[in-house]
Image: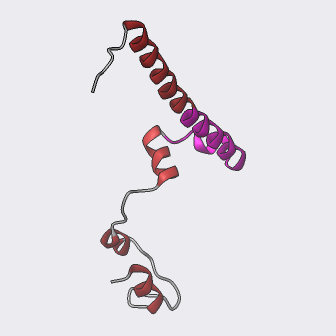
Amino acid sequence: MSYELLTLNERLKYMINKDKIFINEIKLGLNSVIIDFIMLIKIIPEKYISCFNSDEFELLVNGVPFIDIEDWKLFSTYKNKYSPTHKVDLLFIRR
């Protein structure tokens, strides 16, 4: 097998094109975030969103990575016929 060495000019063109592709992918992602945020503001007024810091807003949009069932049980309030041993609660929590 024989290999041809790339010239400096060819290597620079490759790196520039690779960077352009990378930057375009970032632009697409950011544009999606901006469009989603604009749509969110149409649904929820900005004055209600602006009270959250970036970490809280991320939790609001993405949720928590896991749900602490024990914590949920501790802070749950049951009304009417529902209780921690009710069929619906047991199915929901899947003990």
Q: Is residue 54 above or below residue 71?
A: above
Judging depth in this view, the residue of 35 and 91 nearest the camera is 35
Residue 14 in the image, given as x and y percentages of width and height = 44, 18
Indicate yes or no whether the magenta region holds residue 15: no
Residue 4 in the image, given as x and y percentages of width and height = 33, 17
Q: Residue at x 46, y 56 (%)?
A: 63
Q: Quadrant of the N terminus?
A: top left
In this rendering, position of residue 72 left or right of residue 2: right
Place residue 8 in its image quadrant. top left
Q: Residue at x 44, y 77 (%)?
A: 77
Whether residue 47 is visible, yes or no, is: no
Indicate yes or no whether the magenta region holds residue 33: yes
Place residue 6 in its image quadrant. top left
Q: Quadrant of the C terminus?
A: bottom left
Q: Residue furthest front?
A: 1
Magenta stretch?
28-52
Whether residue 67 is visible, yes or no, is: yes
What secondary structure do most residues of the magenta stretch adopt?
helix
Judging depth in this view, the residue of 72 and 92 nearest the camera is 92
Q: Is residue 82 above or below residue 40?
A: below
Residue 71 in the image, given as x and y percentages of width and height = 33, 68
Q: Residue at x 48, y 52 (%)?
A: 62
Q: Is residue 91 above or below residue 40?
A: below
